[in-house]
Structure formats: C-alpha cells, structure tokens
Amino acid sequence: MAVLDGPWTHKFLISNGIKLHYVTQGEGPLVLLLHGFPEFWYSWRHQIPVLAANFKVVALDLRGYNASDKPPDVGSYTLEELILDIEGVISGLGYERCILVGHDWGGFLAWGVADTYPERVQKLCVLNAPHPAKFREGLLNPQQLLSSWYIGLFQLPWLPEALLEWNDYQAIVTILQSNAVNQAAFSPTDLEVYKNAAGRRGCLRAMLNYYRNLGPGLGERDWSILNMPTLMLWGEGDKTLSQNLTIGTEAYARDLRIHYIPHCGHWVQQEQPQLVNQYLSEFL
C-alpha cells in the first residue's frame, strides 16, 4: 500500500540469528522505536519524520511481526530472546547506545533492555507500558485483572488465532477501535494496513506467543533501579492498562518524568501525535 512508502527507507538486518525488518530516516544519534500489539513499525508513522530532523530514527518490526522473521515455536518469544534482538539491532546498526522508545509490548521490552543493558540506553521513553514489576503488582487488583482478561484467553492453543483471523481479521480492527478515545486516529486505510500485516503467514501465532511467555517474563526477576533519564507518556483513557499502574514507577527509575495525555486511549502516539511529538522532542 502507498501509505507504507514515505520519506523513510525499508531495510533488513540480522540480529540474534533472525532477520528483522525496519524503516529508517534521518542521521545522527540513534532513536529506536518499538511497537506494540497488534501493530508493527507503521504505528510510528507520525513520529518518524519529525524525529528524523535531528536523529537517525529506526522503527522496527519486532520478531514475529509484519516483515520480520517469525520462528514458529513458543520458546522463541521469551523476554530474554526479545531483549537480545534489540541489543543486536543497536550494535548491528553500528551504535554503542540509543534513545529507546517503546509502546505497549515495545515498552515492556524497552524496560527489559534498559534493565539488562543499561549501558546501551542513553534515554528511555515508554508509552502506555507499565514497568513489568508494577504490572505484576497491578494484576493483584481485581479491576486490573478484569481489564487484562484477554491475557488468559491468549494462553490457549489455536483458539485465539482463530478468533483473530475470523471474518477477515475483524478482531484486529475491534482491538484498535475499542481502546481508542480518538476514533479518527485510524482511517479505513490504516485499519486495512494493520489487518494485512496480521494476516502474514505465521504472524498471529507469533504475536500471541509474546503473551504465552508473559508469565515467566513477569516472574521474580530482580529489577534494578535505572539511572538514565526516563519519560512515561500515558493516554488517560486506556481501558486495558489503568493509569494507576504508573504510580510508584519512580522506585525503578530515579530520573523519571510522567505526562498524562487527556482525550486519549491506549494508542497514544497515533491518537495524539502532535502532543506526543512535542513531549518526545523536548525530552530527546
């Protein structure tokens, strides 16, 4: 589709033994953008050209998504493997460090990379992605547990794939629209793009395998206290991840600032791109 073409360039690299697709624009310090579920690099379409004025921007297709490789086995999607992917991308692009930005699952992964390889992360920004320790704690709250019901569903074999594929991937559209306050964030073309990406062979299973490894990822890991500057951006209208999950994050990030974005659901960089771009530009 034409919307996938733009001022950016499509490229591939090998990291941690698999081929990953990314788009890139600009030159300078590396800004690495990590998307969430059920998206791909396209969720950063509003940020890439703006940030590229001062940085080399790389928006990655995470392992299993869109044009990146999709190993079939569940064990290929552990948090440890995903962290190794990102560390390999940074070094594979020829950089020692990056400014790491992640939304949703990409944010969860960004927390993990910053914890495991703090020397690789100059600055950290997470969008509607609680610190994993705070999310584990939040699941003890009945309201948050109810909001996270889908995580249990996604543990089942074959059924979640069938539900997401049914009726021409209508569930992908429903997921995007139902957790957006700004319904204008997704045009009909945008929704088709996301459906097409999810419809690639092996993609649904790969996307769900992230959730099938979530239990160990939220296990009794001894999370360190991060020292790099850290920014949280949070859409206040997120129906699946409560704003309360941000409370206490300073216990894991010494240099933390948080901006809550009104009139915005889960898809913060797509629902309020101008405000997100402003906050990112000021922070970076």
Image (cartoon, helix red, strand yellow):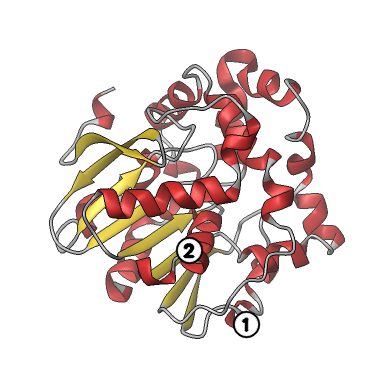
Q: Nearer the viewer, residue 233 or 20?
A: 20
Q: Is residue 183 visible?
A: yes
Q: Tell me where residue 26 appears, x and y as whole percent.
A: 14, 53
Label 2: which residue?
Answer: 126
Mark 1 residue type: Ala
Residue 253, position as x, y percentages in the image: 53, 79
Q: Is residue 278 above or below residue 51?
A: below
Q: Kindly identify the residue that appears in the image at 79 percent across and 44 percent down.
A: 149
Say which label, 2 or 1, has the lower sequence index.
Answer: 2
Q: Secondary structure at mark 2?
A: strand
Quarter containing the C terminus: bottom left
Residue 68 lies in quadrant: top left
In the image as oriented, which residue stretches furthest toward the right?
142
Element under label 1?
helix
Give me the residue at 48% from left, 63% from top: 126
- The part of the image, by quadrant, that contains residue 45 is top left
Rendered location of residue 2, percent (x, y): 24, 25
How far from the left and from the top, in percent, is residue 266? 56, 52
Q: Which mark is residue 144?
A: none
Q: Which residue is mark 1?
A: 251
Q: Is residue 265 above or below residue 40?
A: below
